[in-house]
Image (cartoon, rainbow, N blue to C red):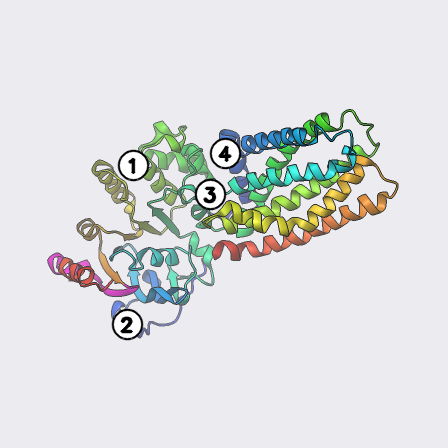
């Protein structure tokens, strides 16, 4: 019996998470319904003021509020199955690099978050922006959405592991998560707003924030990857 | 497999628990002054013992004696605050991954994903451990635990006894040399206990077993070695052949009853 490659172990863990989610649909359903409810609340909140404000300029911020809170809900649930019946300990008993567990779980969270965004973003557009003239740069929102989702899933996976065994883990996750993703969030809101509303300062309001967000992702994911062994060991 | 013999046995507190003539290579487990502290409280306090290959060690002790913590340290799930431990000569601190390949753990928690089927759970672990022919191994284990007919059912639908049988299969999927049992009878009815015992006996072979149990009679009947812990320290450690059950149970009662724990 030889130790399988890191990639094989990664694929095995990722397939397990995906299979489990598609069987229970716990994360996807709860995140999807929550996103829909946020859109409904937005509808009520903006119903009387829509004529007086420029929704296109607020669109980036509103969209990211939806994504952040929806993600928090999903990330909080992402280790629920691992905690149940001591499954995380079963995985930690296997001779594997702990960072593989992080990478597989973060990848699964990215996929689930993106799946919800694929439904939530068109709905958001349909309800709040479909009557407005669309900037030619609109489709560029895909870039900040993907970069932001990758960063939030990575940081969220790490924090979800840390808070897994705490008493009020949902609150703890939010308290740690939002300050830590703030630079990423700020950059992504700026880039998303620039893409939605269009801007003549494309370099300043889209490219630069996106580059900063990418840099933040790389640094934070590397830190999480390196520290994961210590976190699960502690 | 690279083996590390470790230092010679020279134990201040634990010397009486080792055989000075023993060969470290023949030892399935060597614990040398294992200490695990949580803050200022020592859950395990300089525990030292050696267990030969093929032995069955039962660890007894009152609640909070440090039994589960000791098992977690020996199974690499917790890092010791001090001391050394070797599994089949492999140093847990230096080569934890190599040691993990030699260890199986059956706990009162099944470590199985309830929404996956029995077969999917076992295949998951077989692939992670790198078992050569995972499908064949999983089929063999499902046959061994008598649950081939339920292989496609989700573990969530299983009774506690059936889940524990799958848990045995999970722990043995990579053919470990040392198997740890952490209060495996919790929540099992008498019939399920009998089935569990038969299964353990059938897979025992030349494997080494370490079991934490509150059931003195059962634990003593199954073991070749017995160890009593109280307040994280070894009260007694001996081969069963050197013990009389009546004396041993009296010692255990005194240990618990006198408030040593």
Per the model, the C-alpha gap separating discs 2 and 4 is 50 Å
Chain of the residue under the numbered disc 3 shown in the image: A
User: Which range is magenta?
Assistant: B231-248
Q: Which residue is mark 3?
A: A82
Q: CA distance from mark 4 to mark 3?
A: 11 Å
Based on the displayed image, in which of its 4 quarters is residue B159 positioned?
A: top left
Label 1 neighbour load within 10 Å: few <14, some 14-19, many 20+: some
B240 magenta-colored: yes
Residue A99, percent across and down?
56, 51
Task: Please name the residue that numbered disc 4 is placed on.
Answer: A20
Mark identifier at residue B252: none
**Residue A26 is one of the magenta-drawn residues:** no
Vertical relation: B204 (above or below) B139: below
Left or right of B92? Residue A6 is: right
Look at discs 2 and 4 and give the one toward the viewer.
4
Residue drawn at x 74%, y 47% as measured from the top left: A187
- Which badge, 2 or 1, is on the more N-terminal residue? 2
From the viewer's perspective, tell me whether residue B107 is left or right of residue B225: right
Q: In this rendering, do the residues under marks 2 and 4 share a single chain?
A: no
Q: Are marks 4 and 1 in contact (CB under 8 Å)?
A: no
Query: Could you say which disc has been placed on residue B161 in the image?
Result: 1
Image quadrant containing the N terminus of chain B:
bottom left
Q: Residues within 10 Å of mark 2 (few under 14, many from 20)?
A: some
Element on which disc 2 rests: helix
Q: Quadrant of the C terminus of chain B?
A: bottom left
Identify the element where label 3 is drawn.
helix
- In the visual, does B216 lie left or right of B36? left
Chain name for mark 2: B
Label 2 and label 1: CA atoms lie apart by 40 Å
């Amino acid at each position: 019996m030889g130790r399988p490659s890191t990639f094989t172990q990664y694929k095995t863990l990722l397939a397990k998470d995906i299979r489990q989610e598609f069987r229970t649909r716990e994360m996807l359903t709860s995140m999807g319904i929550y996103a829909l409810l946020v859109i409904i609340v937005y509808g009520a909140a903006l119903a009387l003021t829509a004529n007086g404000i420029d929704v296109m300029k607020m669109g980036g911020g509103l969209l990211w509020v939806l994504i952040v809170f929806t993600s928090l809900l999903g990330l909080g649930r992402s280790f629920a199955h691992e905690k149940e019946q001591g499954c995380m300990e079963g995985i930690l008993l296997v001779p594997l690099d702990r960072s593989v567990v992080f990478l597989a779980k973060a990848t699964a969270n990215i996929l689930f978050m993106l799946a919800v965004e694929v439904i939530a973003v068109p709905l958001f557009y349909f309800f709040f922006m479909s009557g407005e003239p669309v900037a030619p740069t609109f489709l560029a929102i895909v870039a900040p959405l993907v970069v932001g989702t990758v960063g939030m899933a990575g940081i969220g996976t790490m924090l979800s592991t840390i808070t897994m065994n705490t008493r009020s883990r949902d609150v703890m996750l939010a308290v740690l998560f939002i300050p830590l993703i703030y630079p990423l969030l700020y950059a992504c809101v700026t880039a998303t707003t620039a893409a939605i509303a269009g801007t003549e300062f494309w370099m300043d309001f889209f490219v630069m924030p996106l580059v900063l967000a990418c840099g933040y992702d790389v640094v934070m994911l590397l830190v999480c990857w390196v520290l994961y062994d210590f976190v699960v060991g502690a | 497999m690279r083996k590390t013999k470790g230092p010679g046995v020279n134990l201040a507190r634990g010397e009486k628990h080792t055989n000075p003539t023993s060969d470290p290579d023949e030892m399935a487990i060597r614990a040398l002054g294992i200490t695990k502290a949580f803050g200022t409280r020592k859950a395990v306090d300089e525990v030292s013992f050696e267990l030969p290959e093929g032995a069955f060690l039962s660890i007894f002790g009152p609640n909070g004696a440090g039994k589960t913590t000791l098992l977690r340290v020996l199974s690499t799930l917790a890092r010791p605050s001090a001391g050394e431990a070797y599994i089949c000569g492999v140093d847990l601190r230096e080569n934890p991954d190599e040691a993990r390949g030699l260890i199986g753990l059956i706990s009162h928690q099944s470590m199985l994903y309830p929404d996956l089927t029995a077969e999917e759970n076992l295949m998951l672990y077989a692939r992670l451990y790198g078992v050569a022919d995972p499908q064949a191994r999983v089929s063999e284990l499902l046959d061994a635990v008598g649950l081939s007919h339920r292989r496609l059912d989700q573990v969530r639908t299983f009774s506690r006894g059936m889940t524990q049988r799958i848990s045995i299969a999970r722990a043995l999927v990579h053919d470990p040399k040392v198997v740890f049992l952490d209060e495996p009878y919790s929540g099992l009815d008498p019939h399920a206990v009998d089935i569990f015992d038969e299964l353990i006996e059938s897979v025992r072979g030349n494997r080494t077993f370490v079991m934490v149990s509150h059931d003195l009679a059962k634990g003593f009947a199954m073991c070749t070695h017995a160890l009593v812990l109280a307040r994280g320290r070894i009260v007694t450690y001996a081969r069963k052949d050197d013990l009389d059950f009546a004396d041993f149970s009296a010692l255990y009662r005194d240990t618990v009853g006198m408030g040593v724990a």
